[in-house]
Amino acid sequence: MSAEKINTVIVGAGQAGIAMSEHLAQMGVPHVVLERSRIAERWRSERWDSLVANGPAWHDRFPSLKFDNISQQAFPPKERMAQYFEDYAKMLNAPVRTGVDVHQVTRLAGRSGFRVVTSAGDFEADNVVAATGPFQKPSFPRIVPESAGVHQMHSSVYKNPQQLPAGGVLVVGAGASGTQIAEELRKSGRDVYLSVGEHYRPPRAYRNRDYCWWLGALGLWDEVKIKPKKEHVAFAVSGYEGGKTVDFRRLAHMGITLVGITRSWDNGVLSFAEGLAENIDAGDKAYFDVLRDADAYIERNGLDLPPEPQAWELLPDPECLRNPLAHLDIAAAGITTIIWATGFKFDFSWLQVDAFDEKGLPFHKRGISAERGIYFLGLPNLVNRASSFIYGVWHDAKYIADHIALQNAYTDYDPYRI
C-alpha cells in the first residue's frame, strides 16, 4: 500500500494539535491531525469526575471562540472543556482523523521528510509536529510494593470517592490534582493523609482579579525577570468549587493530616522526609510575594481595586504541622488506598529521530527541534510558563507555523521561477 503524502502531520488533537491546525491552515500549509482516540480525550477519560479548568472561561480559551452557556468567570468542567475543543475543530473544519494511533516516525532514506507509520496506514510528511502535550505517561515512584495489600492508583485513573475500597486514603503529591482529590475525599467522609513536598502556592484571586489576570499584568507568563526555579515543584492552584486558594492549613483544619514527602516503605510502615514545615513556609513566601507585587502594581498604576487585608492572614498551624509524623503504619491508620498524584513523564518512543538530548528529552528551541522538520508543541516551558496552558500553546503554535511556512518556501525555491 502506498503512503499518503502530506506536508505536515500533527500528532495529537488536544489543545496543542487544534491550535497548530488553525495556524497551518491560515498559512495554507496542507496538513492532517492524527488522534488515537477522540478530540481532547484526556479531558474526557483520564481525569476525575469533578475536575474543572485551572483558569476561568474568559482566559482558558483560544482567541477566536468564547465559551457559551457558561459564566466567563466560571471554571469550566472537564466535559465542557473537551466539548470546547471539539467545537473549535468543527469551526475550523480542521482535518482531524480520530482513532488513528501513530506507531513510529522515522526519517526517509536518501530524501527529505519522514515516514509516519500508523494504525490507518503510512504517511510521508515533510514535517511532523509532536503535539501530545505534557501529560503523556503516568509517573510515580515504586516505593510501595504491589504485594503490600494496599490499593494503589495514579491520579489519572481516579474518578470519584465511590470508586475506592472502604477505608482511609494517602494522597501523595500536593499540586492541583493532589490537593483537590484530597479535599474531595475528606468531604466524602474519608480519613485522608496528604503527602506534601515543594510547591508553588499562588492566590487563586486577589483584590478582585483572578491569578490568571495577575500573571499577565505582572509579566509572570513571560518570565522576563527570570527567577531561579527548581524542577518538579508542584503547582498548587485550582478552580475547584468555584475557585479558591489552595491553603494547606485549611485542609489540615478540615481533618486532612499533612505529612512530608513519602520516602520509603518497610514492612507496612511508610517513612516521611523531614521538611514539611519548611516546604509549607516556602509556599507561603511565594504566595505573599504575589500579593506584594500585586499591591505595588496597583499603586504604581493608580488602579481602583478594593483592598483585601484578609488575604494576608494565615490560619494557626495545625498539630500535624507543628509535630509532623515521621512514620505511619498504614494498617493501624486504616489506609486502604494510595493515590499517586505525582505527575507524568514524556513518552516519545514512537518518534525515532535525532531530536533528543543525552537524557532523552526533546532538544529544541521554541519547539523547533534539532532534527529539521520535527517540532514539539505543548510542553512545559517550551517558550515560557504559559506554553503548556491553553492561553500559551495557541501563541507557540503560531510561531511554529510561521517557521514551517518559511522552511517550505526554502524547499520550494527555484531560481528560474522567481
Image (cartoon, rainbow, N blue to C red):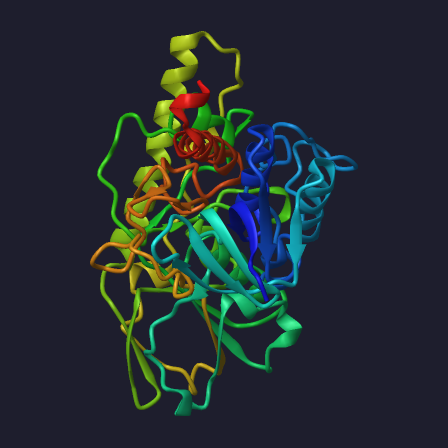
Residue lying furthest right = 69
At 41% from the left and 27% from the top, the residue drawn is 414
Q: Is residue 218 visible?
A: no
The quadrant of the rendering that contains the C terminus is top left
Q: Is residue 282 above or below residue 28?
A: below
Residue 283 image position (x, y, % from top left): 33, 45
Residue 110 image position (x, y, % from top left): 34, 54
Q: Is residue 56 left or right of residue 179?
A: right
Q: Is residue 319 left or right of residue 149?
A: left
The quadrant of the rendering that contains the N terminus is bottom right
Q: Is residue 271 left or right of residue 393?
A: left
Q: Is residue 288 above or below residue 133?
A: above
Residue 252 image position (x, y, % from top left): 45, 58
* 154 or 415: nearer the viewer: 415
At 63% from the left and 41% from the top, the residue drawn is 75
Q: Is residue 132 visible?
A: yes
Residue lying furthest front = 416
How many numbered circles does the render carry? 0
Residue 289 image position (x, y, % from top left): 33, 31
Q: Is residue 49 above or below residue 163?
A: above
* 296 or 61: nearer the viewer: 61
At 54% from the left and 39% from the top, the residue drawn is 20
* 54 or 382: nearer the viewer: 382
